[in-house]
Every structure is written in C-alpha cells, then in structure tokens.
Image (spheres, rainbow, N blue to C red):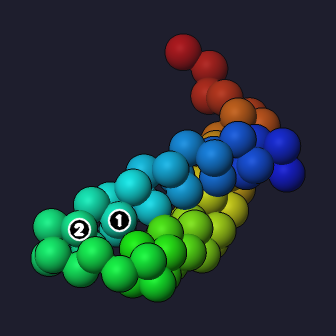
Amino acid sequence: MLRLSAVLYILVATVLAGGAVTAVLAMNMMERWQIAGAFAAGCVVALPIAAILGRKMYNAMNSPSTPA
C-alpha cells in the first residue's frame, strides 16, 4: 500500500501544488515566498489525500469479489 500511496502522492501533489501556484499567480502575488508557500501548502495537503486514496484503492483491489 505504501508504494501505491507514493505513486498517488506524486500525481496528487503535482495537481494540488500546480493549482495553488496558479491561483497565487492569478491573484498577482509575485513574491518568491508567496509562490513557495503555495507550492508547499499543495504538497502538504496532498499527503493525507494520497494516503486515503491509496488505502481505498488497496482495499478495493484486495476485497473478495462477488460472484457474477
């Protein structure tokens, strides 16, 4: 499950950090600390999201399937 969460983190962090930086730049905040803060916030928020998604996907893959 850790490897699945790590791969998901790469994807989720890219989306969230990119969106946060885009939002900061759209608000005309051009200071380096503002851009870096938005990037760091996106990366931190992505941690629990990737863990929850990884757990749900891992459980769904390992649950016994119902007969058709």
| Tag of residue 61 | none
The answer to whether any part of residue 36 appears in the image is yes
Q: Which residue is mark 1?
A: 21
Q: Say whether residue 58 is left or right of residue 57.
A: right
Q: Say whether residue 36 is left or right of residue 63.
A: left
Provide the secondary structure element on which disc 1 rests.
Answer: helix
The reply to whether callout 2 and callout 1 are in contact (CB within 8 Å) is yes
Residue at 32% x, 59% y: name it.
19
Q: Amino acid at mark 1?
A: Val
Within 10 Å of the Cα at label 2, are there few (<14), some (14-19), or many (20+) other Cα atoms? Answer: some
| Tag of residue 25 | 2
Q: Amino acid at mark 2?
A: Leu
Q: Is residue 12 above or below residue 24?
A: above
CA distance separating discs 2 and 1: 6 Å
Residue at 14% x, 76% y: name it.
27
Residue at 84% x, 43% y: name it.
3
